[in-house]
Image (cartoon, helix red, strand yellow):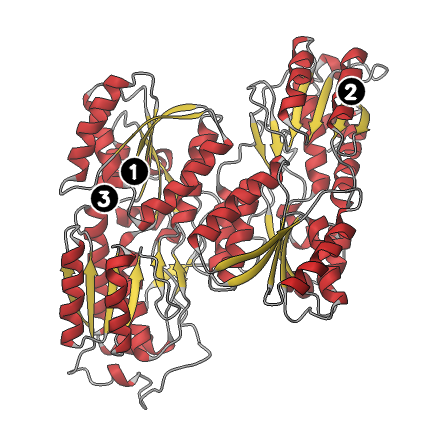
Amino acid sequence: MKPSRFLVHALVATSFVLVSCAAPQATPQAPAAQQATPAPKEQAPALTPEGIPAPFADPNKKVRIALVREVGEGSFFERYLAGAQSMAKELGVELLEATARGDMAKMVTAMENYIQQGVDAIIVDHGRPDPLMPKIEEALAKGIKVVSFDLVVDNPNVPEIEQDDMLIGFMLSKKVAMDHAGRADVVYVNVGGFAPLDKRDRLWQDFKWRYPGLKEVVKIGAVTDNTAADTQTRMEAAMREYPQANVVVAMWNEFAKGAVRAITQAGKAAQYRVYSVDITNEDIQMMTAEGSPWVATVATDSYSVGRLAVRTAAALVAGEKVEKYLLVPPQLITREFLLENKVTNMEELIKAMPALGESSLNWFPWMEKLLARNGYSMPQVAAAPAGAQEASAEPICQVKSDKIPAPFGDANKKVRIALVREVGEGSFFERYLAGAQSMAKELGVELLEATARGDMAKMVTAMENYIQQGVDAIIVDHGRPDPLMPKIEEALAKGIKVVSFDLVVDNPNVPEIEQDDMLIGFMLSKKVAMDHAGRADVVYVNVGGFAPLDKRDRLWQDFKWRYPGLKEVVKIGAVTDNTAADTQTRMEAAMREYPQANVVVAMWNEFAKGAVRAITQAGKAAQYRVYSVDITNEDIQMMTAEGSPWVATVATDSYSVGRLAVRTAAALVAGEKVEKYLLVPPQLITREFLLENKVTNMEELIKAMPALGESSLNWFPWMCTLAGK
């Protein structure tokens, strides 16, 4: 069995839980399709005896919906328009359309015209808030419903539709980082000033920060009347000026098409790998062409997005209440998948990957009657998993081997692995140590352990001692690179293998284990944003200087930027000998000083425990909702306590992470080749899930949510034999 390689499947799978729509696939395996289920709403509109809302009751008097677009050039937008037109036809709606060809003044004029005509709703497609907001407010004041697509509108009455561009940026950037072990010379193709491109760019910047080996050698791009042709010219110049480049990251398929044409015509397809956003028939043809450098794209089907836009506008006209943020989940589509499934067009792609098809968002019961009246039936949408644990556990130890590596061949001479930890306080780290010890015992390894209690000098001393002792491997657990890197390099020079946990080490020979903290920060921040429709007064509990906390913070900053209604009223936190107690004291002070606060975002469970105790003892559990990272037995007890404000956490099982650390060190000692980045996928765990499944401890949680259990990473056949698996 080969070591598993984590790409982006955990993020894609978990996005269903966060946005409540058709679930993306963890792998290219398609779920069964199901008929779109009309969703009942709390405030249903008044219906005619036939069950149809009044505005749609008379088939001879059509509802009029205007679609005002900034741009319409390119196959993505052509397919989007076709989807909008198809939905309008099925609903019996008159769709009026105006495209401004990138001219904001023309967009404003089109808005003015449709307001004067007294249309029932306007879909504002792209554009910039400053010139458009006055017209949006004017339309609302006159009773015209407004929906936006890829335009941020700071008004709770205007639903915002998007392809979930933050997730797109995350998935694409991560795919690049993992494919190239964090090192590539990148031609970056993007432009600012467009909401979706700005969101995707924000995540790309995060991954460049996280993986400094991703070198952006040049940024090119412009949106023109022929973007693909313009990009081709720019790419040709970039290839001449930066001959070392080997990757293209293109945040729109029109950019990608131009880049691919330039690369192919220059005969450099073998040198480059192109990654993009969006997909159409033309893109599929280019991706599957012989020798194509276009290896992956992250996309929704713009046809489905166009249908959702019209359906949402119709729902508002009918009097339905819809969510503020309507995020269509993207899919990762690789060239390999297209070729394996013999996909040549969008219809075949959706058949092979049903989650890319019809969105399940905003289907209401009366729409089924309306479609039937117009001669149509309800469409099929991808079946959604039922629960937070849709990322299933991967099987381990399917293959065993009696070929035990030489270092492990003598039962009387144990391999020695040292575990040097910055901190050991708290139930997370206690469980992590227990996992490391259990794995060492199973593999017959002698595990030596030293905890520095937050003192970098003690960490360095411990490293020195173990190097002098000539141990076989050292696991460096947390800490800071500056004081530790000289000792890491010294250990490597003496043939001692090194593994890090939650420490960034700029050396390709040192595997880095983490809980996938970028993903943790993304999932937690998004959960908060979605639960509160982008508006909350937040007490933020975190500190800098710890690699995992810094990564989680980076994503929290992204979501505050994306959802400016998330107000961070105060930041508190410190890592001490008793972090939970210290946080409790700080939280008590924060509650007195900021009585309007209603949410706590705690980037470590020790922070969360202190905050929850302060809130509960102050009798304010009904006012607050607490979101955290990590989970242990104690956390479960606190989350499931009656009236607990602790509503969600994003976590791995630290026991499993400790086992992975020892297993990885053992693999290096044995001479195995392991990946540079070993990311343990986290799970979203809600209080509701714990109560529904009657979970009281970690063992019961793993049974209810198997994906939280043993990591499949770095199990080699000989290990399975040694461990008796």
Residue 461 in the figure: left or right of residue 354:
right
Give the SS element for disc 3: helix
- Residue 67 in percent (x, y) is at 20, 64
Quadrant including the C terminus = top right
Camera-side mark, 3 or 1: 1
Residue beneath disc 3: 281
- Badge 1 density bin: few <14, some 14–19, many ≥20, Cα 10 Å: many
Which residue corresponds to the image point at 37% horizontal and 33% vertical from the top-left? 336
Circle 3 residues within 10 Å: few <14, some 14–19, many ≥20: some
Given residues 597 and 393, the one toward you in this image is 597
Q: Earlier in the sequence, mark 1 or mark 2?
A: 1
Return the disc, 3 or 1, that comes first in the chain's sequence: 1
Give the residue number, with chain letter if any, for mark 2: 461
Q: Read off the residue under disc 1.
A: 190
**Lower sequence index among marks 2 and 3:** 3
Foreground mark, 2 or 3, reads: 2
**SS for callout 1:** loop
What residue appears at the point 49 percent right and 29 percent down from the top-left corner? 211
Amino acid carrying label 2: it is Thr
